[in-house]
Image (cartoon, rainbow, N blue to C red):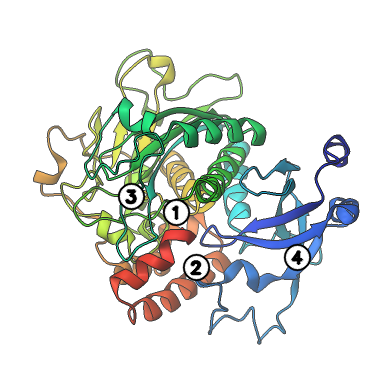
């Protein structure tokens, strides 16, 4: 890690940052001359900092604050090391960190440790998840009273229409996307295909599959930070909020995963289109946990505006082969790449908690040899299916009281997330939708 800074003498300051429960980067600015100390000894800040609400406020009822004297945790660099922050004007490096207790134990309230704990369970069974994510986001002009599509730097025009799979829409913002891909190269984020989506100024970029799920979550977290920061340098906003426009689809964060055994074989691959028993067990686990873990996939008030029938977001708990109306899709293609696509999460999620919830549920199903219902065919919205919670309050209650969730997340994580979301639910209820959008636009 130290060598990276020596190779980049232009960097004068660093940011050390960890993800809180909402995926917000929390940390410090440090002069480069003190970076060696951070690398060797870590840094410290209160355990409660990873348990702030969306405004960055303490949680009123949290035992982490006054009851414990607001005790410190010890934050150490992740294996990612230093990377540039291309959205800032001054040359700056980011050092991702994660939190431990004073005695060296991982802090269970850190979302990155929540994912690590799930991956430890996979490792104990000799399995390695291979993960890829698709991130949808909006480019937005938020300079006026109403949100709208930015003016194109190329044409000087503002196109107020959906541009699904439009090359022209990509070309209108070519300078931004060129800078974005260059920045992904600098940060070693494996950005692949970009497309325009069905919303106003909406785009999707896929991140390549990775056999290190912690790194895949890191990539998604860093990518969201990069897109939002870089857009501001170009004179507009980028947002991963679930539903900025009432009349257009919202943004999802779809996850594809398969599992490798110790010999590198895909345990979902049976040589044909159907997949193995292990594939079905994993699907069953994901379906069984979908209702109770919806708070992770739809963590904000605005999230539930996206999850309505017919809006390209799943509402019914079901699975299917090659069917994008289902919550779980098994894509077609080569049997060697047989995998699960989990389509529930919005773009506003914390990637660490999302992958922990998906992979933990899949592993529960594998451990239980659970069997899913029959795959559906046709339009899932037209079928009588069990449903994902359609209210924020209902999702909080389901998450708090679920035995399934307790198999995936540590008690401290469950408590912290529930307290956070109950506080946000209360205070968001005092705001208008416009005021809520102003909060979510730059945060999630």
Between the residue at mark 3 and the residue at mark 4, the CA separation in whole angstroms equals 33 Å
- Say above or below: 61 vs 220: below
Q: Position of residue 398 (x, y in %)?
A: 35, 66
Label 4 secondary element: loop
Label 2 secondary element: helix
Q: Nearer the viewer, mark 2 or mark 3?
A: 2
Q: Nearer the viewer, mark 2 or mark 1?
A: 1
| Label 1: few (<14), some (14–19) or many (≥20) C-alpha neighbours in 10 Å | many
Residues tagged 1 and 4 counted as in contact (Cβ below 8 A) = no
Can you identify the residue that label 1 sits on? 349
Decide if residue 285 is on the left or right side of residue 80.
left
Q: Nearer the viewer, residue 100 or 299?
A: 299
Q: For the N terminus, which image quadrant?
A: top right
Residue drawn at (58%, 56%) of the image: 111
Can you identify the residue that label 2 sits on? 417
Residue drawn at (14%, 45%) of the image: 381
| Label 3: few (<14), some (14–19) or many (≥20) C-alpha neighbours in 10 Å | many
Between the residue at mark 1 and the residue at mark 4, the CA separation in whole angstroms equals 25 Å
First in sequence, mark 4 or 2: give its number.
Answer: 4
Can you identify the residue that label 3 sits on? 288
Between the residue at mark 3 and the residue at mark 1, the CA separation in whole angstroms equals 20 Å
Q: Nearer the viewer, residue 115 or 429?
A: 429
Q: Nearer the viewer, mark 1 or mark 4?
A: 1
Between the residue at mark 2 and the residue at mark 3, the CA separation in whole angstroms equals 21 Å
Label 1 secondary element: loop
Label 3 secondary element: helix
Can you identify the residue that label 4 sits on? 101
């Amino acid at each position: 890690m130290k060598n990276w800074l020596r190779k980049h003498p232009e960097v004068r300051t660093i940011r050390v940052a960890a993800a809180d429960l909402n995926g917000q980067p929390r940390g410090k600015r440090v002069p480069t001359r003190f970076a060696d100390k951070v690398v060797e000894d870590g840094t410290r800040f209160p355990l409660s900092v990873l348990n702030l609400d969306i405004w960055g406020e303490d949680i009123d009822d949290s035992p982490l604050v006054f009851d414990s004297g607001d005790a410190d945790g010890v934050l150490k660099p992740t294996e990612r090391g230093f990377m540039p922050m291309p959205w800032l004007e001054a040359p700056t490096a980011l050092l991702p960190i994660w939190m431990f207790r004073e005695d060296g134990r991982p802090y269970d309230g850190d979302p990155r440790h929540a994912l690590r704990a799930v991956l430890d369970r996979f490792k104990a069974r000799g399995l390695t998840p291979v993960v890829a994510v698709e991130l949808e986001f909006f480019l937005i002009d938020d300079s006026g009273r109403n949100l709208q599509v930015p003016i194109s730097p190329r044409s000087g025009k503002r196109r107020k229409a959906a541009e699904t799979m439009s090359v022209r829409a990509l070309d209108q913002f070519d300078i931004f996307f060129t800078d974005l891909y260059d920045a992904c190269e600098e940060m070693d984020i494996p950005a692949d295909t970009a497309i325009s989506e069905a919303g106003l100024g909406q785009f999707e970029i896929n991140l390549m599959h990775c056999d290190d799920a912690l790194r895949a979550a890191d990539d998604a977290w860093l990518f969201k930070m990069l897109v939002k920061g870089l857009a501001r340098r170009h004179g507009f906003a980028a947002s991963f909020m679930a539903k900025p426009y009432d009349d257009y689809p919202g943004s999802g964060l779809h996850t594809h995963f398969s599992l490798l055994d110790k010999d590198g074989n895909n345990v979902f691959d049976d040589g044909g289109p159907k997949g193995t028993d292990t594939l079905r067990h994993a699907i069953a686990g994901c379906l069984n946990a979908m209702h109770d873990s919806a708070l992770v996939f739809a963590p904000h008030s605005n999230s539930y505006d996206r999850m309505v029938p017919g809006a390209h977001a799943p509402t019914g708990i079901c699975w299917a082969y090659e069917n994008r109306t289902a919550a779980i899709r098994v894509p077609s293609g080569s049997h060697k790449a047989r995998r699960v696509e989990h389509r529930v999460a919005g773009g506003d999620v914390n990637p660490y908690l999302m992958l922990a919830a998906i992979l933990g549920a899949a592993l529960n199903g594998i451990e239980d040899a659970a069997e899913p219902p029959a795959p559906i065919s046709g339009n899932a919205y037209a079928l009588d299916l069990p449903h994902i919670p359609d209210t924020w309050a209902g999702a909080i209650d389901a998450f708090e009281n679920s035995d399934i969730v307790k198999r995936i997340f540590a008690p401290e994580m469950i408590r912290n997330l529930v307290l956070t979301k109950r506080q946000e639910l209360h205070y968001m209820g005092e705001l208008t939708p416009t005021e809520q959008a102003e909060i979510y636009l730059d945060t999630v």
